[in-house]
Amino acid sequence: MPAMTAPGVLVHGGAGDLPGARIPAHVAGCERAARAGREVLRAGGTAVDAVQRAVEVLEDDPRFNAGTGACLSRAGTLELDAAIMDGATLATGGVCALPPFRHPIAIARAVMHSGRHVLYAGEGARAFAQRQGFAPADPPSMITAAARTRLSEVQAGRAESGWPGGTVGAVAWDGVHLAAATSTGGMVDKEPGRVGDSPLVGAGTFADDECGAASATGLGEAIIRVSLTRLACEFLRAGRSPQAAVEAAIEVLARRVDGRAGIIFMAPDGTPAWTRNTKTMTYAYAALDGREFSGA
Ligand code: ASP
């Protein structure tokens, strides 16, 4: 039977507890990103091209915890994590603890294409990016007043440290292949050098044409322990529906490590699914047949 789904892109703008007043703008940002990814598919781009574009749109949006507007480490610096994965070949690339560059996901893609290594960290990631022709950003151009305020509130004990929400991710199906991408600043007030789940294959980001594509968001230390995105894909491979697969993965996260997170997922036939056990996770879907949905 032919697939009932059309090629499409599903994005998230982070799991957490987003105040109600901020939800509409975050959902609108996700909608813009999903539509930008869909335009790439419409123009003949691949699933990898589409997830990269969708994530770049969110990295440029200062409301999200990725690229411009990402949260700050204890030292007041931006240390960015991102990864991308091609479900056709299992090719993948990532950067972690990357100093400021406008589009960490584009550098992750360059890592994937370079083929030699799959993950670069810190200074080595910066050097790799510059060798590939990416220009480092002036830190003040990417650090927002909101990120500075959030860090000083946490450091003054007026707000809880931890993950701020707003990590971004995308999954896409181009009619043949799947891809996934995730980008984040991590956690507010994190120790310099801390790396979360987002750039780690099978934890925050995973894609395999045989069993699905997924991007996670939430407390990275918990997501890593259960390999959340890979877990969802393996539940699908074992026969669960896309929705049942993501729900089973989040159930394991909660039961085994008391974790809280959200996940977006796309099955090998392009069926989208998502779930969360946090209060909110903004998301948006846009398909080539015109189907769209979004929410928090
Ligand atoms: N998962 C991210 C991290 O722990 C944070 C988030 O999703 O907001 O780095």
Image (spheres, rainbow, N blue to C red):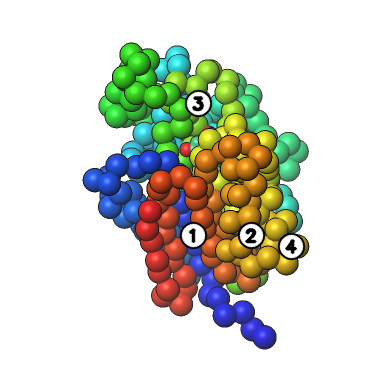
Secondary element at tag 3: loop
Q: Amino acid at mark 2?
A: Ala
Quarter occupied by residue 223: top right
Closer to the camera: disc 1 or disc 3?
A: 1
Quarter occupied by residue 49: bottom right
Q: Amino acid at mark 1?
A: Leu
Distance, label 4 to label 1, CA atoms, is 20 Å
The residue singled out by tag 4 in the image is 237
The residue singled out by tag 3 in the image is 79
The circle on residue 10 is 1
Residue at the extreme left: 21
Q: Is residue 270 depicted above or below 223 in this figure?
A: below
Taking the image as shown, residue 72 lies to the left or right of residue 236, namely: left
Residue pictured at 30% horizontal, 49% vertical: 23
**Mark closer to the chain start, 4 or 1:** 1
**Mark closer to the chain start, 4 or 3:** 3
Closer to the camera: disc 4 or disc 2?
A: 2
How crowded is the residue under tag 4: few (<14 C-alpha within 10 Å), some, or many (20+)? some
Secondary element at tag 4: helix
The residue singled out by tag 2 in the image is 245
Closer to the camera: disc 3 or disc 2?
A: 2
Closer to the camera: disc 4 or disc 3?
A: 4
Residue sitting nearer the eye, 134 or 166: 166
Residue pictured at 51% horizontal, 55% vertical: 275
